[in-house]
Image: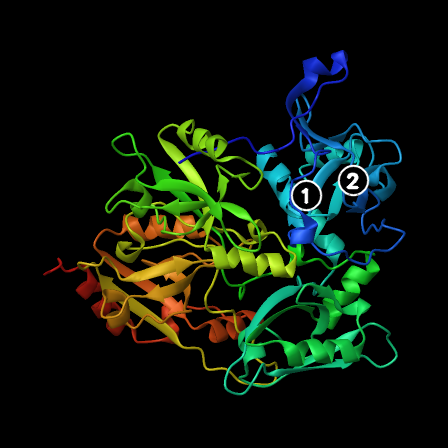
Amino acid sequence: MRSGDVQLPLMRETRQRELSVLWDTMELMERFTFNPKEGIDNPAMVIADDTEHVSDPSLRVCVLKREEGETFGFNLRVERGRQGHVIRQLVSLGVAERSGLKDGDRLLEVNEMFVDNMGHMEVARRIQVCGSQLCFLVLDGQAYEKAVSEGRDLRELAKADRGEGWRPPRLCHITRDSSGLGLSIQPVEGEKGKFTVSKVNGGAAEKAGVKKGDRLVWINGAMASELTHSAISKMVKKCSDHMTVLVIDSESEKSYARRKMPILPAMADAESMPYRPRRLHLVIGAEVYGFLLKQEKAGAGRTGHIIREVDTGSPAELGGIKEGEVLLEVNGEPTESLGHDAVVNKIRQSGQKVTLTTMPPQGQEFYTKLGLSPLLFCVNVAPGCPVEKREIMMTLETTVPPVEPQEDVQINPNVRLCVLKKGSVGFGFHLGCVQQKPGTFISQVTAGGPGQCSGLLQGDVVVEVNGQNVEKESVEDVIFHVKRGGSSLSLLVVDQRGFEWLKKNGKPITVNQLATTSEVENKISKAAEPPTD
C-alpha cells in the first residue's frame, strides 16, 4: 500500500483580509492531471454563445470549457458566516468569467448534479473528474441567502429550471448479440447534424437502454453533430462486438436547447456501462490491510498502481479488493499523477480505515478509448464480509435497467409478498439502487437461498419491508429495516415493469393486490417461527 498527494487544488491566500472568514479553500485553477491525448478528458462539446437562461430570474446556467493547458480560472470556497459553495477570485477574462460566473455566486449544480448539500471536498472532486467542460447552475449570493432565509427548497428550484418531462441523457453500452447491435441511425429531416435512433424490439440496443425515437448525441467518443450520416454508418459497421452511445429523448433534448446547454456524458445515467470503478471501505486488522501495491505498466503506455497478493481472510479481501485491479483513488483523491511511495503514504496515513477506488485494467483501457474519466462512474460498495458471503450488498448501480412500459399496453403487475427466514447464507439476496434516484431493487438473488425460495426475482422493486413502505427511502435505510427484523423478513415487491405502470397510473401497491388477508397473515406467521437450520 503506497500512496501520495493528489493535486486536489489547495487555495493560495492572496489577501490578508480574507483570513478571518476562510474555513476551507480549494483552488480549482490547477488542472486535474488527465492527459486528453490519452483519452481521459471529455471530448469537446458544442456550446452556445449565450449561456444564461432563467426560469427564476436569479438562476443562471454557466458553461465552462477550457483548452489544453488552460485553467477554469476561479476558486471554490466554504467561508465562515456564509452558506453554500462560494465562487471567488475569478481570473480576469478567464474561462469562468467568460461563462458568466460572478464573485460571490453560490454553486447549486455541477453537470446537473445537485451539490449544495455535499461536502466541499466531494464537490471539488466532481469538478475535477468532469474533464475539460462543465455546466454550473448558480445563484447570486444575495438571492441564495434570501432563498435560504425563506426556507425555499433549492433542489426543487434547480429541478424546476429544467422543466416538466425532463429526463437526463443515457450512456448505453451495446454488446452485439446473434442478431447484431439491434439499432439503426437515420438523419432527422430538416435538422442538420441531428440523428434519430431506431431500435429492434428485444435487440442488443434495447437491452442496453436505447429507446424508440432517441436522438443520438455521441457515439464511441465522437460528437454526432460533427459527423455525417455516412461517417456514423461506417463507425457502426466497423465496430467489432460492442459500441457506446449517448442518447436522449427528443423532449429532453429541447430542454437543453432552451437552456443553451451542451449534453455531456458526465450528465448521463450510465446503468449499462461496464467496468464501473468500485469504492471500497476497508478497516485495518492486525496493523495491515493484507495486500501489496505495485506500480506497473497497465496498457496503452500507461503506468498504474496495481493490487497484488491479496491475503486470504484479510481486511482487503473482506472489503472486496481483487487481485490485478488498478487503484484509482485513496479516500476520494485520484492517484494517477502520484508516485508509488506517495500512494503508500496516503494509505498508511489513513489510520484504521481507508476508502479505495479500484477497477480492472481493461476498464481503464475502455474509458481511455472513449475519452472519459472512469471516476465519473464510481459505484459505492458497502463494507461487510466477503462479497460472496454478504447477506445484503448496497450498490449504486443496477444490472437490470429499468423497463418503461409502452403507453398503450395494459400491464399485469407481478406483486408478491416474499417471506424469508435467515439461513446459512443470510437472506440470500443483494440490494441495489440507481444513483440519485429514489427506490431500492433486488440486484442479485443467491441460487437456492431463502430469497429465491420465497419468490424474489432479480430486478424486483422493494415496496415494503416488514410492512413499512420504503419506496422513497435510501438503500441504507432499507438495509437498516431489513437488519432490524432479525432472522425473519417479509418483502412486498413488484416487477420493474409493473412498478412503472402502477406509478404512472396512480395506483397504490399493497398486499391487497396479491392475496387474501388470511393468506398474508399465514405467510408472516411462518416467517416468525424460529429458524431450524
Secondary structure of residue under mark 1: helix
**Is residue 408 or residue 401 the one in the foreground?**
401
Disc 2 packing (10 Å; few <14; some 14–19; many ≥20): some
Badge 2 element:
loop
In this rendering, is residue 404 above or below 19?
Answer: below
Q: In this rendering, which labeled residue sits more in front, label 1 or label 2?
A: 2
Horizontal side of residue 363 vs 94, given as left or right: left
**Residue at 49% in and 59% down:** 362
Residue under numbered circle 2: 70
Residue that protrudes farthest toward the left in the picture: 532
Q: Is residue 169 left or right of residue 298?
A: right
Distance CA(mark 1)–CA(mark 2): 32 Å
Q: Is residue 178 left or right of residue 252?
A: left
Three-letter code, disc 1? Leu
User: Which residue carries the number 1 mark?
Assistant: 154
Residue 153 visible (yes or no): no
The x and y percentages for residue 191 are 86, 75
For the residue marked with disc 2, what is the amino acid?
Glu
Which residue shows up at 53% across the image and 74% down it?
403
First in sequence: mark 1 vs mark 2: 2
Task: Give the answer, above or below, for where 18 lies relative to 27.
Answer: above
Q: Hey, which residue is sitting farthest bottom in the picture?
A: 179
Q: Dot 1: few (<14), some (14–19), or many (≥20) neighbours within 10 Å? A: some
Q: Quadrant of the C terminus?
A: bottom left
Q: Choose top left, top right, bottom left or bottom right for residue 85.
A: top right
280 or 309, which is in the foreground?
A: 309
Residue 344 in the image: above or below residue 264: above
Can residue 138 be seen by looking at this rendering? yes
- The residue sitting at 48% across, 71% down in the picture is 499
Camera-side residue: 204 or 412? 204
Q: Position of residue 497 (x, y in %)?
A: 49, 75
